[in-house]
Amino acid sequence: MIRIPPHHYIHVMDTNKSITRLEIGPQMFSFQDHEKITEGPKKMINIPPRHYCVIKNPIVLEEDGTPVYDSHGEVKVRFGELQVRVQKDMGLKQFKTYTDPFPLYPYEEIEEKVKKCITLKDSEALKLRAILPFFDERFEGVQRFPEDTYQISGPTTYFPFVEEIIEEKVKAFIITNDMVVVLEAIRDTTDSLSIERKAGERWLFTEIGSFIPTVDVKIVDYRAPKVITEKKCIHLRALKTFEDSYSIKRRAGEEWLVTLDISERHIVWPQEEFVSEVFITALSSTDYCYVINPMKKDGTHRFGEKELRMGECQFFLNPGEYLEDGFKEVYVLEENDCLLLKAKAQFEESEELTVVNNEEEKKQSIAKKGKIRKAGETWMIRGPCNFIPTVNIEILEKRVALPLGDNEGVYVRSKKTGEVRLEKGKQTFILKPDEVLWEKELSPDLESLIAYNQSGTQFVPVTIREGKRVYEYVTPNGYLRKKTDVVKFKAPHNSAVQIFDFKSMNKRVVYGPEMVMLEPYEELTVLKISGGIPKEEDVIRNCALLLGPDFMKDEIIVETADHAKLRLNINYNWEFIIDKESPEESDKLFCIKDFVGDACKAMASRIRGVVSTVNFETFHKHSTEIITIKGGILKRDENGEIIPFHFKSNNLFITNLDIQSIDPVDLETRLSLQKSVNLSFEIQTKSQEAQAKHQAARLEQESVGQLDRLRIQDEIVSTQASKKLLQLQAESASVKSTGVAIAQAKAKAQAAQIEGETEVEQATLKVRASQIHQDSELSLLKSRYEQEVTLKQKKSELKINHERKLSQIESEKFQNLMKSLGKDTIKSMARAGPELQAKLLKGLGLKGFVLMDGKNPINLFNAANGLLGGGQAASPNADNGDIVE
C-alpha cells in the first residue's frame, strides 16, 4: 500500500497488459503483484492567474474535458505536439484551461515550467513569427502560415502559442516637434495613413505622439528638423525625382536652398540629401563681389558667366554659385587718384557704377555714358569718385598723381613711341593711359656714389663671379634709390661735375654748390683718383672734382750723391685756377682722370733728380731749399714772392711744398743717426734727473715737519674731546638712574590704580549680568504662562463654540424633522403600536389586562376605570404599561 497525499498523483503500470494509468490522491492505494508504480507520488501542477506552462505529448480530451481512452483502456496521447495550459479560460480555443491543480498523465512532460505571462504596456509590442499554420482567434480567426510575421500591441497580457515564436520586443518611439523617424517598407504594405507603400520605399512619419512600427516597416533613421533663420538656410540635393513637401517637383541630382521665406523648419525627406548649411552673404555700402555661375529666376545656371553684386544687400549663394576672390571694397578715388582700366570684351560704357562727388566731373561722366569700349582698349578714370568695375572691365593698376617739386622728377616712357622723357618742376603730374614710369639703370660705381651722396650709404662688393664685381646695398640709413625717380647728385661747394649725354653725344660741366638732375640718357663722369701713402691707383672714386685749395701727402725714396737712400714724407698744397665761364678750361678739368696720381709722379721725378746732385750732409741741412728752389718746383719772382708750379693740361697749381720727415733707408746711416740722437737724449735726461732728486728731497723735509706739527695739534684736540666725553657720560649715568627710579614708581602706581579700577568694573559687570539673566528668565516665564492661559482660553472658546453649534444643529435637525413629518404623522406613529397590540389582544378575547415592563409604576386609576367598564384603553405611553379592554 502507498499513501497518496492530497493534490498528488502516481502512475501505476499493469505489467500484464503493459498499460499505465493515473491515480490521484488523497487515498490509500493498494496495488497488486502485477502492478508497479512508475512515477510518483508527485505534486500536481498549479498554474496561478496570468501564468502558463507548456506540456509536451498532451493527452486527447473530449469537449467536456474528460480524457479519451483507446480500446486497451489507455489514454490517447498526441506524441510530438506541444500544448499551452493556463489557469483561467481566456476565450481562445488554442488554450487548455485548468482551474484546479492538474496531474500529468502518462507520457506527458513539462516542456516549459510555470512562467509568468508577458505584460505589454501601451508603449510596447511583440513581434511574432508563425512556425505552424493556425487560425489566430486574437485577430478574428486570421489564417497564419509558417514564416508569417505579425505584431501584438499593448496594453495586454500575452499568452504564448505553440504555433508562434517571439522575434523581438518593440518599444514605442516618442515623436515630438524636435524629432521624427524615417520609415522603410520591408514589403508591400499600407501605412497608418492608408497610403500604399512599395517594398523598399522610404517616407517620413511626423505625427506627434507614441509610434510603434508595424512588422512591414522598419525605422531606418531619426531626424531632427533643421532650423532656418534670416542668416542661415540649408542646401539640399534630390536623390531621385519626386515632389517635395512644398509641392515643387524636384529632379534627381537637383540642388536647391530652403530659406526662411519657404519655411522656418525643414525636415530632410528620405528622397533628399542634406548637403550643408549656407550662411547669408552680406555686403555693406562699400563692398561688392563677383558671383560665378549665377542662377536665373527659373532655377537654371548661367555657367561660365559672372555677375556683379553691390551693397547694401544680403543674399544666399545658390548651389553652384561661388564668389570670385571674396569680397572687394569699392575703389574710393581721391582728387589725385586714378585707375587704369582695360576692356576685356566690347561693351557699352555706363557710368551707373561710378559715383562722382564733383559736379563738373559728374557732368563729364554723364556725357561719356553710352560710349563703346572695344576689347583690349585702355583708358583712365580719375577721382574724386567711387568706382566699381563691371565684369567686362579689368583694373590694371591704381595711379596716384605725383606732386613734383623744384628738385623732383620722374622718368616717363611712352608705350606707343618708346620715347623717354624727364618730368620735373612745380606741377602735379599723372601718367597717361599709354605711358609708364621708366627705370633708369646705373653702373655699380655710380650707384654707390649717388647713394653715398644722398644718404651716406654705399655699395660694397661681396663676391666676384667670372671676373665681375657683384654689388649689394649696405643701407645703414635705409636709403634705397627708386629707379623711376630722377637721378640727383648734390655737387659740393667749389666742385665740378661733368655730365655726358649719350643720346646727343654732348657733355657739360656743372659747378657746385648745385643739385644735378640727370636726363634719361645722361651719365655722370666717375673719377678714379689715387690715394694712400705712398699713392696707389684707383683708391678714391667720386663724381665731384674738388677745385681746392687742398693738400695731398706722398712718400718717396731718394738717393743723394754719396748714395745715401732717404725716405721723404711730403705735403703738396694744390688748387685748380680756371675761368668757369670758359668751356675750354672747364673741359680741361676732366681731361686727366687721376690728377693726384699724375701730379705726385711729376713732383717725385723732379725731387729725385735734384736730390741726386747733393750729398747727404748738405741735403740734411738744406732739404727744403734744395727741393723747392733748386729743383724748380717753386720759384720766386722779382719781388721775392713764390710762383706756384702750373700743370697746363688741367690748370692744376702746386702752391706750396712741406717736407714732414726724412728717414734714412740704409741701416748703417740709420744707426749712426740714432746713436747721436740717443747720446744727446741721455745727457739731457741725466741733468733733468739730478734736478728732480734735489727738488724731491727738499719737498720731503718740508712735508715731515708739517706732519709733526699736525700730529701735535691732533693730540691736543683728542685730549679735550676725551675730557668732554667723560663729563657727558657721568651726566648721562645720573640722569639714567634717576629716570629709571621715577619710571618704576610711576609704573607701580599706575598698575595698582588700573588693577583696582578693573576689579570694580568686573564687579559692576557681574551684577549687571546677573540682573540681565534674572530679568530674561522672568520675562520668559511670564510669556510662557501668558501663552498657556491664552491657549486654554482659545481651546475653551473653541469647545464651547463647537458644542453650541452641535446643539443648534441637533435642534434644527429635530425641528426640521418634525416639520417634515407633521403633527398628524407623529400622532399616527404614536398610536400605531398600542392600537396594534390592542387589536391583537382583542382578537384573543380578553376583557381586561394590564401591560407593564416592570420598570415604571402603573396608573391604577385609569386602569380601574377600564376594568369597570370604561371600554377604552388608557392613553398609550411607551415607558408605562398599556391597559386595553
Image (cartoon, grey):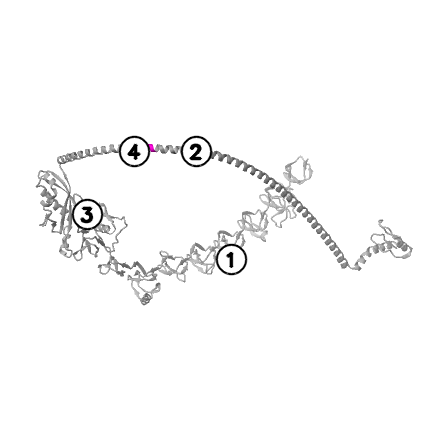
- State the residue in front, 180 or 855: 855
To which residue does mark 4 refer? 706
- Binning the other alpha carbons within 10 Å of mark 4 as few (below 14), some (14 to 19) or many (20 upward) gives few
Q: Give the CA distance from mark 2 to mark 3.
A: 86 Å
Instruction: Please name the residue that numbered disc 1 is placed on.
Output: 195
Q: Is residue 653 magenta?
A: no
First along the sequence among labels 2 and 1: 1
- Badge number at residue 540: 3
Q: Amino acid at mark 4?
A: Gln
Q: Which residues are magenta?
A: 704-713
Viewer-proximal residue among 533 and 560: 560
Q: Nearer the viewer, residue 658 or 834?
A: 658
Q: Is residue 748 left or right of residue 676?
A: right
Dot 1 or dot 3, earlier in sequence: 1
Quadrant of the rendering where the N terminus is positioned: top right
Mark 1 is on which residue type? Ile
Mark 3 and mark 4: Cα distance apart in space: 66 Å
From the viewer's perspective, is 602 left or right of 117? left
First reached walking from the N terminus: tag 2 or tag 3: 3
Q: Are discs 2 and 4 less than 8 Å apart at CB?
A: no
In the picture of the structure, the residue carrying the numbered disc 2 is 729
